[in-house]
Amino acid sequence: MFGGRYTQVTAIRRKNGEIETHELYKKENPTLSIFKKIPLIRGIVSLIESSASGAKHLQHATEVYDLDLEEDNDRAQDTSSTNKTSSSWSFGVVLSVAVIGVLSFIIGKVIFTALPAFLSSILFDRFTKNPLIQSVIEGGIKTLLLLGYLWAISQTPLIKRLFQYHGAEHKVISTYELGQELTIKNVQKQSTLHYRCGSSFIILTVIVGVIVYSFFQYDTIWDRIWTRLLLLPIVIGLSYEVLRFTNAVRDIPVLRYLGYPGLWLQKLTTKEPTDDQVEVAIAAFNRMRELDAEVASNKYSKHSAPTHLSSSTS
């Protein structure tokens, strides 16, 4: 998936070999536009927006996959029956995405915020009362849990394929930024790592958390856990601001090293893609640029631009 100034495009390869694109035009919300200009708050808003748009594209990808299965199982099925099945599946996908999203958020926060605080308290607090050292130990535990989790899921075929597409996206962007033609050969020469990847945000929340948590005292393990959970919005907001800063100074020789922790994490969140996967990424990026150019040249307003388009190319 690629997001431009006006559009977001996801490309999907169908079982018949065609590449289908799912396109969404961005709608400007006046209220959100105000929040996006406020430091700390804009990070949380961006995170919510990214999750929402990602869910929409995931839903479409799942529906396309289900459509392929329907065609394989019963190509003679009549149109009315197919529409009924697709509608039911669409509702199921929406419900599933909502439930999984909420559960993932809760479980993720418990595991990567509460658990490190708990383990640090019962295992290491007896050796030191220094808040900074305690916070560093907690951050170390959190980092080990995060790296272990990413490594474990990257071994599954589904997530490995997802990480390959992630690497393909980075290769396409790097090729474009170098001014080279977007061909499979040129794209495959590039690295799967990219300085502006959102993976950097994950590791930054750990680093920023170490600093923020060190300023707060606690009396019991449960005080420590609740303090961490309540401070999460602040940590997320600050991490987003740090991410913006590291992106802004990435061309400065000394300061560019600030973004290296994010690049190291991408060693786990990206994999070398196949040529077929690169072709899909190129199709999505080219379509995004094409639609963005159309919107810019015709000066579409947020009211006149369509909210959804779908097309396919072979």
Image (cartoon, rainbow, N blue to C red):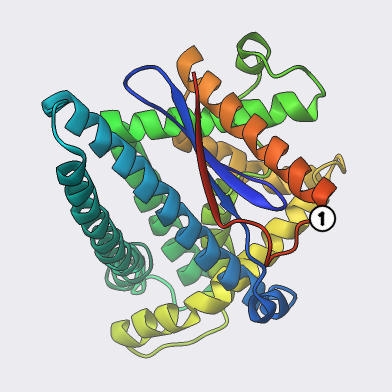
Can residue 274 be seen in this snapshot?
no
Q: In which quarter of the image is residue 168?
A: top right
User: Does residue 118 sit above or below 174 in this rendering?
Assistant: below
Of 73 and 189, which appears nearest the observer? Answer: 73
User: Does residue 36 sit above or below 240 in this rendering?
Assistant: below
Of 210 and 229, which appears nearest the observer? Answer: 229
Which residue has dot 1 on it?
299
Q: Where is residue 87 in the image (x, y as percent from the top left)?
A: 24, 54
Disc 1, SS: loop
Total numbered badges shown on the rendered structure: 1
Of 300 and 10, which appears nearest the observer? Answer: 300
Q: In the image, what residue occupies the spot 70% across and 74% down? A: 33
Q: Quadrant of residue 64?
A: top left
Kind of residue sitting beneath label 1? Lys
**In this picture, residue 102 sits left or right of residue 10:** left
Q: In the image, what residue occupies the spot 64% across and 74% down? A: 29
Q: Which class describes the residues within 10 Å of circle 1: few (<14), some (14-19), or many (20+)? A: few
Q: Position of residue 174 (x, y in %)?
A: 71, 28
Can residue 85 be seen in this snapshot?
yes
Q: Position of residue 124 (x, y in %)?
A: 35, 67
The residue furthest top is 185
Of 20 and 174, which appears nearest the observer? Answer: 20
Q: In the image, what residue occupies the spot 26% across and 36% down? A: 67
